[in-house]
Amino acid sequence: MSKLIQPPKGTRDFLPEDMILRRKVMETIRECFALYGFVEIDSPVFEYFELLSRKCGSEIEKEIYIFEDKAKRKLGLRFEFTSPLGRYYATNAEKLTKPFKRYIIGKVYRYENTQAGRYREFYQADADIIGSYSMNVENELLDLAFFTLEKLGMENYEIVLNSRKILDGIINAAGIDESKKDAALRALDKAAKIGEGGVIKEFKENCIGEENYRSFMRLIDFDISLDDEKKLSKLKERINESVKDETVKNKTNEGIEELLSIIKNFKIAETVGGEAVDTEVVDTCLKAGDTVKFDPFLVRGLGYYTGPIFEIKSKDVAIGSFAAGGRYDNLVELYGARPEGACGISFGVERIIDIIAKKNKDILKAIALPVRLYMAYLSENERTFALQTAKFLRLNGINTELSVSKEPNIGKEIKYADKKGIEYFAVIGEKEFSERKLSLKNLKTRMEMLVTAEEAIKYLKQ
RNA sequence: GUGGAUGUAGCUCAGCUGGUAGAGCCCCGGAUUGUGACUCCGGUGGUCGCAGGUUCAAAACCUGUCAUCCACCCCA
């Protein structure tokens, strides 16, 4: 295949039939975000490069599409929505109502190698709250994630939860030097994939001793029968025993308390069940709570997270995580705004679409096709009447495609309509024109009837 | 950035130890000038990813290169 006719690496063309699911997923996400009180915003696809790279870490910086405009401004394509949000918030702070709850759905760009579920141009959908340090924000975002995924019909996924403060604390308690923290975290993040041996190997490659790994593991070695609350309480005891530095100890405890607060909030449906509006609501709350699990190995990338972090991944489709987020307090300060608490979640729209398409091939059949009727006519004499009938149908909400054939050919046009998945085929010929009617044919059942436009609308609307 | 696999018709692919390309689907025309899913007949379509090299001869072997997919890194 000639390279000229391919879209650039990591980008894709979408066929009309692909768009049906894509639209559906994005609309569902929009609806859910709105139901949770988030308002939609938009911002430029490109920003000043300097702004994008301000706090993202060198790995990500390499992935920014960078270019110069004709006035030699250094610009970059947004690779996610958090730094642009920081800039947006700082720019518009006085016009925004706090806490600022906004969502955005749009394309982002990353210059990286493609792979299953990874593209260079892809959609992300973010919901963020700026202006609160309360853990209620985390609860709201996690509940929103659960709610949205249920609406999307996603199944068999888990929401894992950890905290940057806790990670910093146990890294310190395990005797790992601050300078080697990042390397250690990177190795631990992969624990599930590469196993204990793999982590130890990677530790050693970064001059971190096996004994550090052992003491790390001792801190998070919990009896499997313990629930997350007990695990966190246990962890708190151990930290208090092994950490000398008061600042580190306090910070870690703070992180633990924060996660406990989030978990307790989820359980509230259980404790005050009698006050709930109905049992279905209580069940959903409980299910949401059960879906959230504390995972001390969860690390997450990006340099800006400061508190709780979370990630949502499929348990049966190997595509990585399809949503993630966390708290990034005071990030807006970098862009010139007053420091504010902030937390957000990001949905990987492409991955969600990939998973739905892979697991539920029938889903497209349940979604209405965009064009319902094809309007053909047999000669120029009937064209005007056909055109008016088509417009009448359109005004009444029936998606109608009017023939544009130069020489009407019913056989070919039926074939075309059928191939396109259009349900109904209408013909206006001499006979129909004289009676001011149309022949309406159902292409599936092959039933045909002679009706007026009003009758056709009535019929098609039922 | 690293490793593996794969590039042959619009699509999916076949093509043996080198002898100069084939199937199915699609598309187009006809049987069928107011009715499509089946059938039948006919037809269009390929610098075998690209560039070198080996050879009397390369789609096949060698080298390089590009692209795609998968995995690592990192991440949605």
Image (cartoon, grey):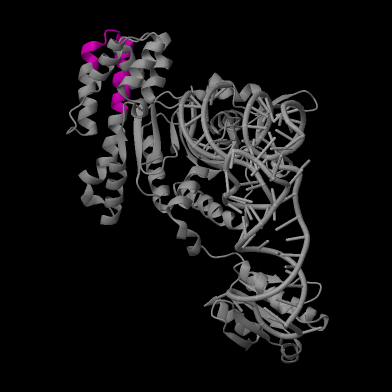
Rendered residue at 67%/70% (across/down): A416
Locate residue A392, reporting x and y percent.
69, 76
Locate residue A121, reporting x and y percent.
61, 38
A314 and B10: which is toward the camera: B10
Rendered residue at 41%/43% (across/down): A317
Question: Is residue A388 shown to the viewer in this render?
Answer: no
Magenta stretch prevailing secondary structure? helix
Locate residue A247, reporting x and y percent.
33, 11
Residue A251 lies within the magenta run: yes
Rendered residue at 61%/81% (across/down): A441
Q: In this view, does A45 lie above or below B12?
A: above
A415 and A82: which is toward the camera: A415
Q: Give the range drawn in magenta.
A: A239-258
Locate residue A366, reporting x and y percent.
48, 64
Q: Is residue B27 above or below residue A159?
A: below
Question: Which quadrant of the figure contains the N terminus of chain A?
Answer: top right
Decide if residue A426 is on the left or right side of residue A382: left
Residue A65 lies within the magenta run: no
Q: Which quadrant would residue A443 be assigned to in this image? A: bottom right
A282 and A192: which is toward the camera: A192
Q: Which quadrant would residue A409 be assigned to in this image? A: bottom right
Decide if residue A80 is on the left or right side of residue A2: left
- Counting every numbered tag in the picture gives 0
Question: Is residue A51 shown to the viewer in this render?
Answer: yes
A51 and A193: which is toward the camera: A193
Decide if residue A152 is on the left or right side of residue A271: right
Q: Is residue A142 above or below residue A207?
A: below
Q: In this view, does A438 lie above or below A139?
A: below
